Amino acid sequence: MPLIASLDALGLDWSGLAGALVGGFATLLAALLSFWLGRVAERKRQDDIDRKRSAGEATSAFHKLCQWANLLANIDQQIKAHFKQAEEDGVTEVDAFLNIGPVAGKLLEPDRIRSSELRFLQTKENFQILEMATLVEQRAANIHEIYRLYTIQYLALQDWLDSISGFERQYDGPVAHDIIPEGYRSGFETRGAQLNRLLAGVCEQLEQDLPFTTEAVQKFADAAHSKFPNDFPKIKFGADERAAE
């Protein structure tokens, strides 16, 4: 017996059943669509959270890079200020350490950059910038350490001189002249040569690393703005002007 005839025999309304089936399918389809749209919205919300987190990490890394760059600039400025003062006093010495004193104040190192803060650079296009950012930190830390050692040895030399019987320091205005007993000149020259080597290392590295650091920080800022145009401003490093696009 045909199904429709069987349904008729049972007293069921075939058209009503068909309508119910269509209605049920439509309800199911609407539920699936609503579920899918909800998943899409949740995914978009999570992507926005992840993007903002990554942008925040990139901003943190940028500030640390700027601090490392400023550390190098401060060291360079101090050394140049010593040389300038020596020139103004008319006492520029052949031995550089006689012109350059210890660190003025305390130069603090920034916090180290975390790998997560550079994650957005882990692409084929930006991998070189990632390496440059890492080198900025390493080179700046190395220069700072050498200058710190220079300061320690410079102060140790002064303590050694003050402990020598017969040592005199005569002043001509702001300029000091050390009178070292003959038997201690060799020790003085040896210590001075060590200081000159440390200072030469600092100056040579600064000459290379200051422009490298400026380039690296600028490229980092450009890459971060390109990746996060709404969360990282367009920055001209070393200039007061900055424009958000």
Image (cartoon, grey):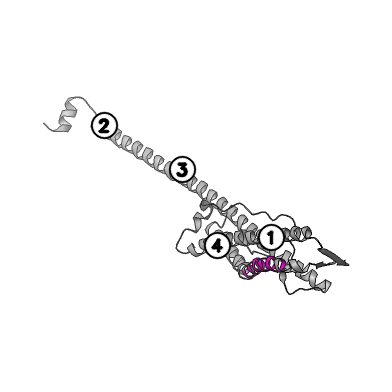
Are the residues flagged by discs 2 and 1 in contact, CB closer than 8 Å? no
Amino acid under disc 3: Glu
Which residue does the numbered mark 3 point to in the structure image? 42
Which residue does the numbered mark 4 point to in the structure image? 135
In the image, which disc is placed on residue 153? 1
Q: Can residue 115 be found in the magenta stretch? A: no
Amino acid under disc 1: Gln
| Residue in the foreground of this view, choosing between 199 and 218 | 199
Q: Residues within 10 Å of mark 1 (few under 14, many from 20)?
A: some
Q: Residues within 10 Å of mark 2 (few under 14, many from 20)?
A: few
Range drawn in magenta: 188-204
Does label 2 or label 1 sit earlier along the sequence? 2
Element type at marker 3? helix
Please indicate, yes or no, whether residue 214 appears anywhere in the rendered image.
yes
| Residue in the foreground of this view, choosing between 87 and 214 | 87
Give the residue at x 86% y 66%. 170
**Mark 1 → mark 4, Cα distance in angstroms:** 27 Å
Q: Position of residue 89 (x, y in %)?
A: 83, 71
Element type at marker 4? helix
Q: Residues within 10 Å of mark 4 (few under 14, many from 20)?
A: some
